[in-house]
Image (spheres, grey):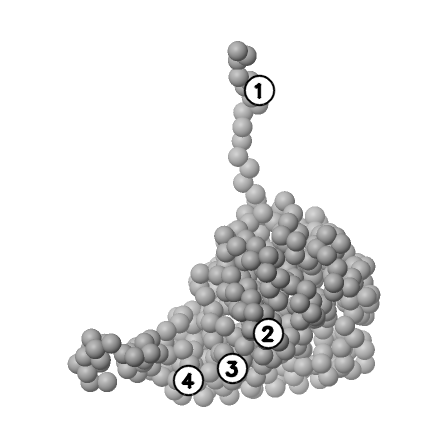
Amino acid sequence: MNAPLKNTVPLSLRVPEPRARPGDPIDFSGLVVAPAGAAPRPDINASAYAVRDLAFTLVRVLDEANVAVGPWNPKLSPAQMKRGLRTMVVTRAYDERMYRMQRQGKTSFYMKCTGEEAVASAQALALAEDDMCFPTYRQQALLIARGYPLVDMMNQIYSNAADPCKGRQLPVMYTSKAHGFFSISGNLGTQFSQAVGWAMASAYKGDSRIACAYIGEGSTAEGDFHSALTFASVYDAPVILNVVNNQWAISSFQGIAGGEESTFASRGIGYGIPALRVDGNDFLAVYAVTQWAADRARANLGPTLIEHFTYRAAPHSTSDDPGRYRPVNEADAWPLGDPVERLRDHLIASGEWSDDDHKALEKEAADLVRAAGKEAEAIGTLGQSRPSVKEMFEDVYKETPWHIRRQRQELGV
């Protein structure tokens, strides 16, 4: 028998590293950004194979002169764009206030979506209000766009006596069935499986509503991601599966989840799911691809996978210091800019907006958030006010067992 061959070169393990660490020069030189308007817009009945190139480019609408160009231009009215801009500005003002409240000890925890506001704001506008969304903790703009009271959101964060979740969820993990906002799960990745199941049930019942789910790029490494794509593909589930690639999963950069080998959108191709990669800081582009995916789902053409290419400008949470793992000002150098500024500048370039209009909107948003904050804080912040003890005995059993009734009687509630 022949002797087994031996490697002449010692094996080595590759551990992906980001382009820059703290103290290094900021480097986005390897980032290839497709020109605005260059990506073709296929028919909604196109197969995953036919549209495979869209998983490797970037669907973009706003060019460097802030003009909407190309076949993906959704041609929104000025009123629609102003509504989207308002949602983003209010969301940012809300984030800023709640971040400060955490720093003042009024809540234990908060997570901002700074730099990613276009994703949820544009999709809220493109979806029907009764479509069910399965969010992560950076889609607060969905609730804001759908008219959910800011006071209720703040009460949930403070876990006070008026908390709609009755103290049963961590801060920022909102839920509202009436607003199509499924309860947020701290175990990331589950949203995809839940959304696909909900969409399958909607189709089985002959309903007209579709599902829309969100995860970060890091969660594509979870088994839930692949299980969800299998079921969505096999059963043509009417669902939009969004991967928000904001470059960082806590302190792990997107390469740890496989982002250096291929795009996250390309993972849909192997499942026979049409996949698109969109400039996540381009409000018009996000709206356009969402509308395309929603039209597919409503036409019984099945699921769509969308990768939103964006950047997490803020810390992962109030427990995080991004300066320990990336250059301090890296967000300012992000080549795709700021979503609020880009839509603002487009409206100004179109003659539909002005700097004074924008300052007035920012003031309106700040006043709105401040008023809601005072109302919520009057009820109480963390430790000052809490849901009644009796709440822990409710909403659990349809018919309360005898031993639970006894425990409640012993507590006198």
How much space separates mark 4 and mark 2, taking CA atoms? 44 Å
Mark 1 / mark 4, whichever is N-terminal: 1
| Residue at (32% x, 76% y) in the render | 397
Residue beneath label 3, please?
178
- Depth check: 237 or 315 in front? 237
The extreme left residue here reads 410
- Depth check: 330 or 210 in front? 210
Residue beneath label 4, please?
377
Q: Position of residue 124 (x, y in %)?
A: 62, 75
Give the answer, above or below, for where 3 lies relative to 271.
above
Whether residue 143 sits left or right of residue 174 in the image: it is right
SS state under label 4: helix
Mark 4 / mark 3, whichever is N-terminal: 3
Q: Position of residue 171 (x, y in %)?
A: 43, 72
Q: Which mark is residue 206?
A: 2
Residue beneath label 1, please?
8
Q: Position of residue 244 (x, y in %)?
A: 60, 61
